[in-house]
Image (tube, coloured by chain):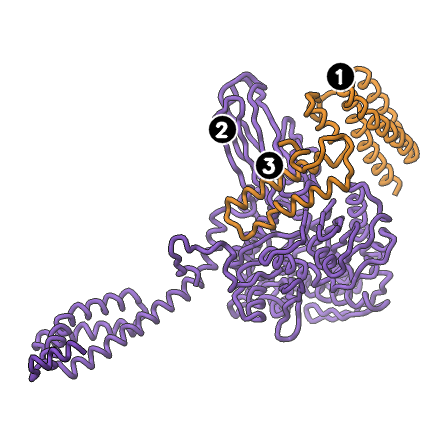
Amino acid sequence: MDHFARLGVPAALDLEPAQLDKAYFARQRQWHPDRFVARPPEEKARASTEAAALNDAYRTLKDPLSRAVYLASLKGVELPGDGKTIDDPELLMEAMEAREALLEAETIEEVDLLARKAGSDMENALSGLAGLFSRDDRPALRSALLRLRYLDKFADEARSRRTALERAKA
Amino acid sequence: MTLLEIHEPGETPLPHAGEGTLAVGIDLGTTNSVVAIARDGKPAALHDETGRALVPSVVAYPNSGGIVVGEEARLLMASEPRNVVASVKRLMGRGAADLHAVAGVLPYEIEPGSGQTDMVKLRIAGRARSPVEISAEILKALRQRAEAALEKPVERAVITVPAYFDDAARTATRDAARVAGLEVLRLVNEPTAAALAYGLDKGSEGLYAVYDLGGGTFDFSLLRLEKGVFQVLATGGDTALGGDDFDRVLAERLLDERKRDGIADQIDEGAVKTALVLARQMKEQLSGRDRTSGRLELGGVPSFHAITRAQFESMIEAPVKRTVDIARQVLADASLTGGEIHGVVLVGGSTRVPAVRDRVAAMIGKPPLVDIDPDEVVALGAALQAEALTAGSDTLLLDVTPLSLGLETMGGLVEKVVPRNTPIPVQLAQEFTTYQDGQTAMAIHVVQGEREMVTDCRSLARFELTGIPPMTAGAARIRVTFAVDADGLLTVSAQERTTGIAQRIEVKPSYGLSHEDMADMLYDSLENAEQDMAQRLLTEARVEARRSLLALDAALTKDGSLLSANERSALDAARGRLEKAIAGDDRDEISAAAEALEALSKPFAERRMDRGIREALSGLSMSDLERRVGE
């Protein structure tokens, strides 16, 4: 059973967070191990497996990027594993330049500027995904998702760079 | 006595089906512990005869013998420092490698465990005792208090742990409950329990933070409350940070002041404990006023100390700032800012310190919620959850893993498999491969923590997956699955997948305690139960033997003439043996003597029965007999 089916939500890129929460809570009410404390061991084990699967589904679908990556994988678009090298030369160049800029950023304001740019790039790329899905343009989908993943990672790095600068200042 | 409970096949009751025993909520704290019970959604802390809900988490093994827990144990701190243990929670699941975190905090002798990750032991009253064993004494005392207050047996409990407790400390807590004879229905994170206590009272909705600063641990959790659902979004903390640290800096200052005044103190365990007791009193007084003073007497030399609240606040600035830094990190993890929080709940006695309250208020931008006693709120929430788990409820608690779980990979790096703040229960797998041609085994090292290098994380377990079919490097597919249950406890399994040979290993990380240690402790705790049982069986055997002696005497008086002299003397000898056995403590000898006597007196009994029948029948006509039979 795929994650969408497990939670009983449509297999779509756009999911209302409230709709997802509602579906998740309703199913956890049924399967959470707390409901099975007084049940025999086999039932307990089953509940634990179900609840874990629901958590996995919820976690995957809650974040828009991981939802998009998952939906793409259902359509046969496989991305290289997390942490693997970027295999798109254009993206590689963009990533290297941005990382260099981040390393050279000496003030919190500079870091914020870079983070804001990455954030708006991410929003644009996310809003472009719907079209790629409906056209079923798999190569374009793949490179868009790879770029999104890089941008997400960059936002993380910007955050930790910001924390480091804050700490140095304090 | 459960040991003797026998059920017919098909009649075995479901676990927890017995309504005779109650389920309580226990806050097993660093400084104080509380036990509470909820009925119909209304929790209440259980008090002792003097009305106190707090049981100091102090265990003493006094020279006079026995074990005392709580206030009584705390009073022995100054007179018998070597026999008293406080703050043992800080050592739960800690190995020698972790000691730096608590070094200098704990004024007692610590012995490393046998291995680097094995749990340390404390040398108390001349014997090495594990933190699990000592915690079990606290749990036993709480259980007794609950049974006395409720007048019913208490065998099941929800026990709270700091959200940031790692797998070792959680396992140790579960083990302690087992030693104390308590079945743990669920380990619940302390901040989550506190939120439960608040949430149900107020029907609150929205984002809430729980700031929990206890005696020895700090937790900060973010929760979303919505229509009976308590969803933990992120959690963080430090298991070696708490009000004890405030006491320590103040105690150090007191000792420094004496030194400055030229008093040459012998700084031993007793001196440190005495200084800590005064420091604690002064700290508590400073929550209510701007300045305080105290008298410290060590080795017969008194000294007087005065301190202002402002001075105290500057002394505790570092630990308080650390709590705020951790809270900020948790907010960042959840991509939230302080302003988005609807309310912050204060938990733990250390949140009574005004400087702490002010800092929390400034961070969140709102006055914190303090309606429920911060010392009792966790136990009350645990009691609510205990009731929910046994009687059923609409509330749903969705908690997360506090720390990332991963595996060691090439070069001592950590590959995270379960990131922190993942909702539990969780089951996640990752594939690994061999790096040498023909490799048939793979070492798997499970670690917990946020750092990139294995050496900076906590080692949970090491095991070896063997029997991998020889293949070229990188061809094997080894799937390692991490499962964290609703108590936050981890199980790891590994499987080689290319060949379809389902070689599978399951590992329950159990550092802390070796199986032998656990067995010894269980044995020790069962020992008393066994003694009680033996005593009861002995008493029963004596009562039974006396009863048969009385019957024999009566028979001899009446029908002694039926026995030959030899028979009589044999019977008298057997009788003498049984009397002697009854006077002794050997239950087996009592049974043996009773059986011997019974065997010997059997012919006598038969003859008596014959005589009885003959007597009854003599002089009766056939018709009389028929009438009698017809009656």
Which residue is located at x 19 percent, y 70 percent? B597
Q: Nearer the viewer, mark 1 or mark 3?
A: 1
x and y percent of residue A154 in the render? 81, 29
Q: CA distance from mark 2 to mark 3?
A: 17 Å
Tag 1 near tag 2, CB within 8 Å = no
The answer to which of A138 and B270 lies nearer the viewer is: A138
Q: Which residue is mark 3?
A: B482
The answer to which of B175 and A43 lies nearer the viewer is: A43
In the rendered view, tell whether residue B196 sits above or below residue B507.
Answer: below
Which residue is located at x 59 percent, y 19 percent? B474
| Chain that bears disc 2 | B
Assess disc 2: are there few (<14), some (14-19) or many (≥20) residues with their C-alpha within 10 Å of its C-alpha. Answer: few
| Chain that bears disc 1 | A
Examine the image and state in which quarter residue A53 appears.
top right
Assess disc 1: are there few (<14), some (14-19) or many (≥20) residues with their C-alpha within 10 Å of its C-alpha. Answer: few
- 2 and 3 marks on the same chain: yes
Q: Which residue is mark 1?
A: A139
| Amino acid type, mark 1 | Pro
| Amino acid type, mark 3 | Phe
Precedes in sequence: disc 2 or disc 3 = 3
The color chain A is rendered in: orange
Q: Which residue is mark 2?
A: B502
Q: CA distance from mark 1 to mark 2?
A: 36 Å
Answer yes or no: is residue B217 visible: no
x and y percent of residue B511 in the render? 56, 44
| Amino acid type, mark 2 | Ala
Q: Nearer the viewer, mark 1 or mark 2?
A: 1
- Chain coloured purple in this rendering: B
x and y percent of residue A6 in the render? 65, 36
